[in-house]
Amino acid sequence: MKRIIDAVYPYFERTIFGTLIFIMMGVILLATAKYAYDIYLSIRSYFHPDASIDYLQRVMHEVFGGFLIIVLGVELIGSIRTYFQDHVIKTDVVFQVAIIAVSRHVIQMDFDKANPLTLLGLGFLAIALTAGYSIYRRIELKQPSDNTSAGNN
């Protein structure tokens, strides 16, 4: 039974990861089209005589949040591709995706309605992620550039 599983698993893994990549590509493509259309509508409505600076700030909030969610999706595809090709999860990519996700959440947050503990937690999380990424990069730069070593995953 173990030999059958060992023989079948690589095909199963390729099928799953290939399917995930194609699904993510489709979702990101649709999200990018919707994002571009929403920006077009926002720009068009901004030139309405009743538009204000507050409206512009709300639009910019949405634009930055939308941009970061698309970047997050692209980074996730890159992470899946890297694992699919090298069977290694890149730590720096995990840090980058987490930092982008937290940044997106902070950008889209309504600070007037946010719980102070939530703000404190997000601030701590952002600091912890960037500090962890910085420490990881310093350690990675000190190591020899052997890509097959265990320190690069």
Image: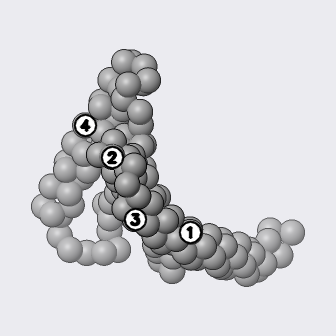
Say whether residue 43 is visible.
yes
Q: Which residue is mark 4?
A: 127
According to the image, what is the colour scheme of the structure? Answer: one colour
State which mark lies toward you, 3 or 2: 2
Disc 3 marks a residue whose amino acid type is Ile
Give the mark nearest the N terminus, 2 or 4: 2
The tag on residue 97 is none
Looking at the figure, which quarter contains the N terminus?
bottom right
Q: Which residue is mark 3?
A: 43
The tag on residue 52 is 2
Q: Quadrant of residue 137?
A: bottom left
Disc 1 marks a residue whose amino acid type is Lys
Disc 2 marks a residue whose amino acid type is Ser
Give the mark nearest the N terminus, 3 or 4: 3
Outermost residue, top side: 116
Label 4 element class: helix
Marks 3 and 4, how far apart in space? 34 Å
Marks 1 and 4, how far apart in space? 32 Å
Label 3 element class: helix
The tag on residue 34 is 1
Q: Are marks 2 and 1 in contact (CB under 8 Å)?
A: no
Label 1 element class: helix
| Residue in the picture at 37% in, 50% down | 51
Give the mark nearest the N terminus, 2 or 1: 1
